[in-house]
Image (tube, helix red, strand yellow):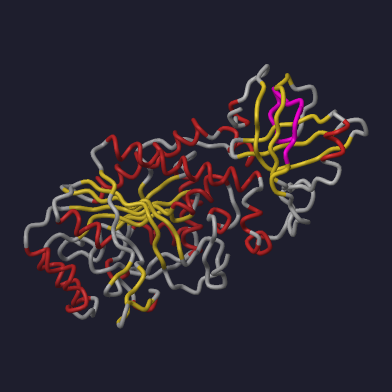
Amino acid sequence: MERKYIREIKVGQEVLLCGWVFEIRDLRKLKFVVLRDMTGMIQCIVKSQELLKKIEDLSLESVVEITGKVKKASVNAEFARKDAEVEVSRINILSEAESLPIQVNEKTVKAELPTKLDWRALSLRQAKAQATFRVQSQIIVGMQEYLNKNGFIQVFTPCLMGVASESGSEVFEVKYFEGKAYLRQDPQLHRQLTVVGGFERIYDIGPSWRAEKSNTIRHLTEHRTCAVEMAFINSEKDIMRLEEQVIISAFERVNKECKKELEIFGAKLKIPKSPFPVIEFPEVYDILSKFGKKLKEGEDLDSEAEKILWEYVQKKYPGAEFYFVNRFPFAKKPFYVYCDENSKYARSTDLYYKGMEMSSGGQRENRYGKLIKNVKEKDMPLKSVEWFTKFFKYGVPTHGGFAIGIERITMMLLGIDNVREAVLFPRDPQRLTP
């Protein structure tokens, strides 16, 4: 008999199921075994004396193979399908689990986050963890759907860099044969060079690293982004309009495909509407001042300022959850951002969701002379970026892009308290295993 998945079985079928034992309830003359596979859970009823004896000492999270008849559910079991149950005719124990170091069924004892991460392959079996990564998968699918339909192609840029891309103090150095290399902070520079190579619409989904000793609920040393670049733009506003549609497509996909997962979190998903509100510098300083937060002109936002701007957006634009902060001070931005002549503010924009930064982006500098001028203004050795800048001598269109943090948007969409729970195996200053 061919194996069936729990989500696809129907009443009246004779089925073969495989999965993990999530829960066992003993009712003297029979047992209820709740079985879990990658598609969900179902209650299995064991009545035969022979089978009851066989599973007498069966432990939770053991892997079993069950054959039986699907019937209409007589008793509701939490998390399991409400419309069907299986009357068991055969059980084969494939792998018996030892006593668990953490509980997979969180109805019993909820483990603290460090313990859950120490035993990550077990905590991933928990209902919320399963839901988290199903939602995360659909976020990415939704982003790709929009990009693929609108002429973007997926590319793969290098993770190893011969030269530190931005700040040498925040990069990881790795041994590279007899020399050294660096893990990228962002795929952006190679995305730009791909545009220089004539690929006008591209996106890259992959990891980046930042060697920050930051232990906040939103920082990781390794994270993933959906990074997009587009040529022949008029300004950073074209990039904002593009990013809005990518976000909307992702949310529509999650809303369509993840109703059960959203229910597990009690998450009320709101599909955002375009255009998103935009707050620009230097007006940002006036807004903050009215809320009692004084920043000198030219200063960047700190966490308190970001919180105040979120309060401002909620009052000024009721119902809006996404918004852009635009035209950041050029002095606080890297050399490759586009800045108009005689302006202190760059065409650089960040997207926020419920007060947390989701992405950085904007228009890139495409003029060779201005690019070199920017490098000098930032006190960077010209030689260190020549591998990148030299190509801008040979005809480069206006272009721009953004990189959305996959883990952060998952965290905020589901209302997760710590970004580490939105990563399969998180990496931070204290954690490199498992």
Which is more toward the observer, 7 or 384?
Answer: 7
Q: Residue at x 40, y 47 (%)?
A: 323
Q: Main secondary structure of the magenta part?
A: strand
Q: Is residue 88 magenta?
A: yes
Which is more toward the observer, 157 or 348?
Answer: 157
**Magenta residues (range):** 78-92
Q: Residue at x 86, y 42 (%)?
A: 56
In the rendered view, does 308 fall on the left or right side of 418? left
Which is more toward the observer, 222 or 306?
Answer: 222
The answer to whether residue 28 is above or below residue 164 is above
Find residue 217 and report its horizontal and vertical position in percent: 56, 62
Q: Quadrant of the N terminus?
A: top right
Q: Residue at x 63, y 35 (%)?
A: 40
Q: Quadrant of residue 35?
A: top right
Find residue 286 and report its horizontal and vertical position in percent: 39, 59
The answer to whether residue 319 is above or below residue 191 is above
* View extreme (bottom): residue: 178
Q: Residue at x 74, y 35 (%)?
A: 91
Find residue 348 and report its horizontal and vertical position in percent: 29, 58
Which is more toward the observer, 292 or 53?
Answer: 53
In the rendered view, does 378 fall on the left or right side of 127? left
* View extreme (top): residue: 12
Q: Is residue 351 magenta?
A: no
Find residue 307 and report its horizontal and vertical position in percent: 51, 57
* View extreme (right): residue: 28
The answer to whether residue 359 is above or below residue 107 is below
In the rendered view, does 404 fall on the left or right side of 192? right
Task: Count all numbered tags in the image, as a single digit.
Answer: 0
